[in-house]
């Protein structure tokens, strides 16, 4: 009879199964943990990266705004210096103004009146409002030194603009009422002789002379803001932003454009900057000839209704690289007046209309488009087309963009 063992039997199969379950459980826990770590870690990494992008974008917006403001101030100083120099030159040569160019005469008159402060010298403040009104900008930027620099600059800029509006040194010597009289009620601006007489009278007026003499005070105020050039360089250093990044930021655009080819331009293009009284169109032909038609409607206090003036001139065009070159043939220049839209008495028509017509024609020939092509009949403009090929942007050196839409 066999002996019974006192040692219990071992269930080998069950033990192996238990170890397998434990092993799978541990692997599952480890995998889940890694997954959680990766998920939250990746999310945190993406969140940090997006926060860094937002931080740099906001910083570049502010730094670029400060740079642009400082550029405006530099241009104001340049404008002040040029106008002051012209004014002193005219004062020294007040006895022979007839020998001095009309550009200098008009520049002086604009300088001492409110005929208009050049738009490019106005200060944009939209980015300052965004910075000051959003708590997110403070949380996003976080750098206290940078924030302090920006606050100091915007405060100094606001002070400068307030002083420019309130200080006696900036108040134009010719009041609004006097300007109105010059333009509307008197004959001081009705002819070249009258403009010279007005210029001579203004040059001899003590308050005009004082305004010219206060140029140094105006320059001093502008110069006080230029110290922030160095501060903005510190801003770029603090935020780790290079000039190349800033340039790319300023030039970035979502617009899909391409350079115009000759086949793209064939057809008639209407200027986008148009109104019921002013319209410009260009017709480019396959044989590389073109015609431009400008229609202007104008009136005058001596008659009712409007005269329609049409200016037509032709020439040749070509595309050189990315540039449209137009050569105007001045022999084709034609100016037609349609006076059927005006009403006035026969006496007024005979006495006043010829003088008004001649005055308008003199001004037309002495300014704008006709003056440009008369002095240089060759115009070169860089071209950009939008994705549809029906919108054209032309850029001439030193001038604003011009936009045209292709007539369908």
Image (cartoon, rainbow, N blue to C red):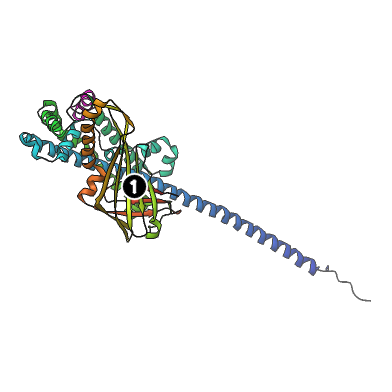
Task: Tell which of 402 and 86 is nearer to you.
Answer: 402
Residue 107, image quadrant: top left
Residue at the front extreme?
A: 346
Of residues 181 and 269, which is closer to you in this image?
Answer: 269
> Residue at position x 46%, y 48% from top?
51
Determine whether 141 is above or below 114 in the image. below
Q: Is residue 290 above or below residue 218?
A: below
Q: Position of residue 262 (x, y in %)?
A: 37, 60
Horizontal and vertical percent position of residue 261:
38, 60
Residue under label 1, please give it.
402
Asked where in the image residue 21 lies, by quadrant, the reply is bottom right
Q: Residue at x 65, y 57 (%)?
A: 29
Q: Residues within 10 Å of mark 1 (few under 14, many from 20)?
A: some
**Does 177 lie within the magenta span?**
yes
Label 1's element? strand
Q: Position of residue 205 (x, y in %)?
A: 11, 26
Predominant secondary structure, magenta span: helix
């Amino acid at each position: 009879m066999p002996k019974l063992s006192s040692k219990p039997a071992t269930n080998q199969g069950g033990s192996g199964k238990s170890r397998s379950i434990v092993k799978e459980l541990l692997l599952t826990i480890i995998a889940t943990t890694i997954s959680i770590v990766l998920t939250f870690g990746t999310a945190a990494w993406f969140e940090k990266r997006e926060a860094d992008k937002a931080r740099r974008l906001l910083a570049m917006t502010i730094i670029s705004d400060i740079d642009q403001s400082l550029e405006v101030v530099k241009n104001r100083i340049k404008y002040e210096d040029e106008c002051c120099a012209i004014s002193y030159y005219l004062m020294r040569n007040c006895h022979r103004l007839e020998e001095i160019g009309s550009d200098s005469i008009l520049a002086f008159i604009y300088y001492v009146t409110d005929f208009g402060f050049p738009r490019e010298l106005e200060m944009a403040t939209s980015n300052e409002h965004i910075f000051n009104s959003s708590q997110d900008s403070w949380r996003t930027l976080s750098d206290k030194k940078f924030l302090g620099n920006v606050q100091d600059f915007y405060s100094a800029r606001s002070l400068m603009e307030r002083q420019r509006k309130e200080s006696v040194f900036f108040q134009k010597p010719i009041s609004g009422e006097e300007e109105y009289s010059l333009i509307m009620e008197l004959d001081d601006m009705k002819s070249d002789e009258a403009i010279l007489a007005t210029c001579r009278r203004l040059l001899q007026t003590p308050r005009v002379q004082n305004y010219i003499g206060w140029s140094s005070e105006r320059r001093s105020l502008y110069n006080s803001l230029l110290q922030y050039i160095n501060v903005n360089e510190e801003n770029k250093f603090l935020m780790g932003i290079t000039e190349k990044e800033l340039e790319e930021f300023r030039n970035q655009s979502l617009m899909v454009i391409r350079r115009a080819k000759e086949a793209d331009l064939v057809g008639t293009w209407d200027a986008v900057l148009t109104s019921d009284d002013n319209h410009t169109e260009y017709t480019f032909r396959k044989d590389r000839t073109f015609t431009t038609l400008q229609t202007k409607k104008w009136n005058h206090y001596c008659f009712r209704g409007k005269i329609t003036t049409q200016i037509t001139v032709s020439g040749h065009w070509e595309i050189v690289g990315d540039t449209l070159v137009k050569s105007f043939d001045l022999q084709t220049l034609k100016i037609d007046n349609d006076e059927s839209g005006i009403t006035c008495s026969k006496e007024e028509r005979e006495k006043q209309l010829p003088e008004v017509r001649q005055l308008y024609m003199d001004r037309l020939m002495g300014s704008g488009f006709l003056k440009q092509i008369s002095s240089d009949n060759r115009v070169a403009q860089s071209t950009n087309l939008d994705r549809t090929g029906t919108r054209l942007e032309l850029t001439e050196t030193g001038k604003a963009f011009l936009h045209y839409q292709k007539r369908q």
